[in-house]
Image (cartoon, rainbow, N blue to C red):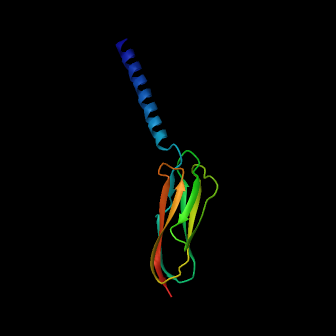
Amino acid sequence: MKTTVTIFVFLIASVCVNAQDKQANDAKILGASISWASSTTFDFGTVKKGVPVTATFEFTNNGSEPLIISDAKGSCGCTSVEYSQKPIAPRVKGFVKATFNATSIGSFYKSVTVSNNTTDKTVMLYIKGQVIE
C-alpha cells in the first residue's frame, strides 16, 4: 500500500511540475516579437553622391500575436522608409526598407526608428557608409 501511495504522489508531482514548465514557456512567447534576419546595421560601403541606395531589413514575428509596425521614420530628410503595412502573423516575415539619397560627400550614419507593438515598443535600425563624388 505504501508503494502505491508513493507512486501516486510521485505521478501527481510530475504532472504539476510539467504543467508549470509549459506555462512558463508559453509566457515567454506571448505577444508579438521581432527577430531580425541579420544585423540591425547595414553598411553600404562607398556610394555615389545623388544615387539612392536601399537597405532591406527582414524580420520574423516569433511571438504568438500579430506584429504591427505603427510607424517607421528616418532620422533625416535624406532617408525615406517603407515597411510592412499589414499585421504580421506569428512565424511570418516582414520588412523595413531604408533608402538613402546622399546630397553631400563624406561619411554618414543614419537611423530609422521602428515603432511597433512588441514589449520594447521601438527598434533602431542603422545605415552607414561613405559618399563619394
Q: Give the mark count.
A: 0
Please indicate whether residue 94 sits to the left or right of residue 128 in the image.
Answer: right
Estimate the x, y position of residue 82 in percent, counting from the top left: 60, 65
- Of residues 9 and 67, the one nearer the viewer is 67
Please indicate whether residue 104 sits to the left or right of residue 88 in the image.
Answer: left
Tell me the quarter of the picture where residue 78 sits: bottom right
Q: Looking at the image, is 65 positioned above or below residue 107?
A: above
Estimate the x, y position of residue 70 in percent, counting from the top left: 58, 55
Identify the residue shown where x is 47% and y is 51%.
Answer: 120
Identify the residue shown where x is 60% and y is 52%.
Answer: 88
Please indicate whether residue 21 sits to the left or right of residue 90 in the image.
Answer: left
Identify the residue shown where x is 50% and y is 68%.
Answer: 75
Please indicate whether residue 57 sits to the left or right of residue 10 in the image.
Answer: right
- Of residues 77 and 116, the one nearer the viewer is 77
Q: Looking at the image, is 125 positioned above or below residue 53?
A: above
Estimate the x, y position of residue 97 in percent, counting from the top left: 57, 66
Residue furthest right in the image: 86
- Of residues 112 and 92, the one nearer the viewer is 112
Residue furthest front in the image: 77
Quadrant including the N terminus = top left
Tell me the quarter of the picture where residue 11 sits: top left
- Of residues 65 and 111, the one nearer the viewer is 111
Estimate the x, y position of residue 110 in percent, counting from the top left: 47, 70
Identify the residue shown where x is 38% and y is 23%.
Answer: 10
Residue furthest top in the image: 1
Residue furthest left in the image: 2
